Amino acid sequence: MAALDGLRLLAALMVVFHHYVGYGGGTKPSDSAWGRPASEVFHRAAGAGAYAWAGICLFFIISGFVICMSSWGRGLGAFFRSRVMRLYPAYWFAVLATTAVLVLWPVVREPMGVHHVLANLTMVHLGLGISSVDAVYWTLWIELRFYLLFALVVWKGVTYRKVVAFCLLWTVAGLLKLPMLDTLVMSDYSSFFVAGLALYLMHRYGPNLLLWGIVAFSWILSVQYAVEHQAQINPALGRTHVPDLNIGGSHLHEWPGVLLITLSYLVMIAVALGWTARIRWRWLTVAGALTYPLYLLHEVIGWTFLRLLHRHGVQPWVAVAAVTAGMLGAAWLVHRLIERPLAPLLRRGLDRAVDQLRAAEPPAARLPLADLPAAEPATVPRPPVRESSTV
């Protein structure tokens, strides 16, 4: 679906804009692209960039939509292989490349020790209490936990009923906010994934009151998240005054973040209802392929080169344009030289591992037809599949 690829790139560019133009100036102004408050560098544009973190929320909604779409009719083994092949090759390269840049040019921060870098390669380092080589990896830890939860649905076979039940149970579990479960339930972010899952069901089967209710309730929870999140990040944006350091001020309002999240919901509703089906520009497919490597590479590496260019007298907007173009070019190279060659190798290795695992089981213990499409629910009539909903 070309529209989704375009939206993914839009979300990534929003995050890039946030980190390059809107971020920095809090209690650690050195830990940013410019080494001083972004509002001193870009003035009014920094105010707009301060809200572009909402691109992450659009990412999460798209993730719920795409995971439901791509796992339909697949077994747990296929689901596991697809996630490993999609996430790890570019991620491994990004961890090592970011570390190399910090070793060569430690102008933004010092490189981590070898044991921390090795832990980062697992992608579960935050669960072990180890900091990230690049702060943007926090979203991957959230994505991994979403995959773990949705794997329960894939294990039993993805159907309309099961996805709806999953959405309802996850929403209720998030509302309970039980400390012992919240690490897995992720109550702050679950509404975005739930909305994406419900929107895919709407796309596949058509809208109904139940699905509209799930999306609307998720939107309300997402609005609450936007209000709370903006208040939390204001210090990092230099928007909360710190008297002892004489920095900050000009508190940011919450409504622009709420507006951006609402627009994210509206544009995904348009996709779900098939209003974007005529968008088939080929370049959007390429754009979608660049999104993940761009997201992984842009922050610390981008900050390093922005700082170096700024020290040599390059104007801030020129530096931002040059570094953004460079990050897009690097993302294309990672896709062509890292992701595409390594994905088939990983697939073959994982296929052999799964085959050996199944061969080691006694025949009676094997689950026949584990990777065949799950049966459609008899109570939910399936209309003819629109051309835009083909996978």
Image (cartoon, rainbow, N blue to C red):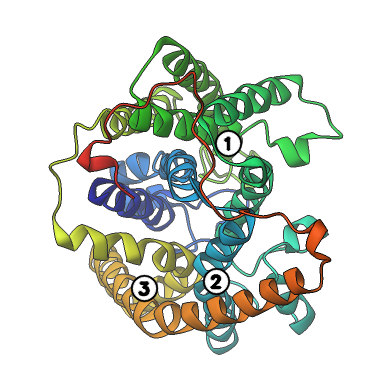
Q: Count the labels in the image.
A: 3
Q: Earlier in the sequence, mark 1 or mark 3?
A: 1
Q: Is residue 251 above or below residue 41?
A: above
- Report the amino acid beneath label 3: Ala
Crowding at mark 1 (Cα within 10 Å: few <14, some 14-19, many 20+): some
Residue beneath the point at 57% across and 35% down: 240
Q: Is residue 243 visible?
A: yes
Q: Closest to the observer: 17 or 124?
A: 124
Q: Earlier in the sequence, mark 1 or mark 2?
A: 2
Where disc 1 sits, the SS reads loop
Where disc 2 sits, the SS reads helix
Outermost top residue = 209
Residue beneath the point at 47% across and 80% down: 344
Q: Quadrant of residue 361?
A: bottom right
Viewed as shown, does residue 199 lie left or right of 112?
left
- Report the amino acid beneath label 2: Tyr
The residue singled out by tag 1 in the image is: 241
Q: Quadrant of residue 161?
A: top right
- Inter-mark Cα distance, 1 to 3: 37 Å
Residue beneath the point at 15% across and 46% down: 279
Q: Quadrant of residue 96?
A: bottom right
The residue singled out by tag 3 in the image is: 331
- Report the amino acid beneath label 1: His
Where disc 3 sits, the SS reads helix
Q: Residue 237: image x %, image y %?
A: 51, 44
Q: Residue 114: image x %, image y %?
A: 75, 84
The residue singled out by tag 2 in the image is: 91
Q: Is residue 28 visible?
A: no
Viewed as shown, does residue 177 lie left or right of 313?
right
